Amino acid sequence: MKMAVHKLSIDEFDEIDYNLIAIHTSLEDYRLAYFINQKLPINLAKSSDEVHINIKEGETKFSRFYFYDEESTVGWNLVENINEVIQKNNGSTQDLFSDTNEGITTKVYLLPEFKKADYFLKIENADDSIDINKIKTILNTIENITTVYTVETKQIKSKNNLIF
């Protein structure tokens, strides 16, 4: 009796099943989520499951708002792109400021190749029923959003940061 062998190509796992929209705005995360909820038929809510990133300077968490549309099985994530890591002064160096409890702040980006984007709207399992161009047009009507654009997933070097 011969067993069938099924080989899986690594490319099969690298398949992108989401759309990513970059958002430039001065709005705070909760206000942006509120305005998106007003304009789109979704209900983004603050998720306790924040996005954790570890870099050599330390660890940080990016706020995340999430909505799962059970009817269309589409997941919506609004995630901030910019945060900070504060390195504490460990006191090992003696200088003018060694007795202060201040730390060094380092900016951290969820997707470092898109440093100008403030937030990303990640739409998972979006089929043809969701018109990304229409969503971008609607998002552009929100006051204080300066620009919105689709991110080509091939341009993303740090795709692993989008696994959440």
Image (cartoon, rainbow, N blue to C red):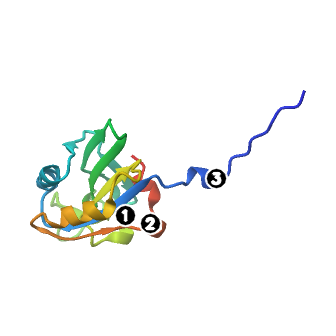
Tell me the SS state at disc 3. Answer: helix
The residue identified by callout 3 is: 10
SS category of the residue bearing label 1: loop
Q: Earlier in the sequence, mark 1 or mark 2?
A: 1
Q: Is residue 160 above or below residue 108?
A: above
Q: Residue furthest front?
A: 129
In this view, 56 is above or below 152: above
Q: Which mark is residue 156?
A: 2
Q: Position of residue 84 (x, y in %)?
A: 25, 60
Identify which residue, 46 or 51, lies in the foreground.
46
Q: Amino acid at mark 1?
A: Leu
x then y, percent, for residue 42: 22, 45
- Earlier residue among tags 1 and 3: 3
Q: Amino acid at mark 2?
A: Ile
**In the rendering, at what x and y percent does residue 71 appear?**
32, 36
- Pick the residue in front: 14 or 54: 14
The structure residue drawn at horizontal position 67% and vertical position 51%, both measured from the top left corner, is 9
Q: Please give the label number shown on residue 111.
A: 1
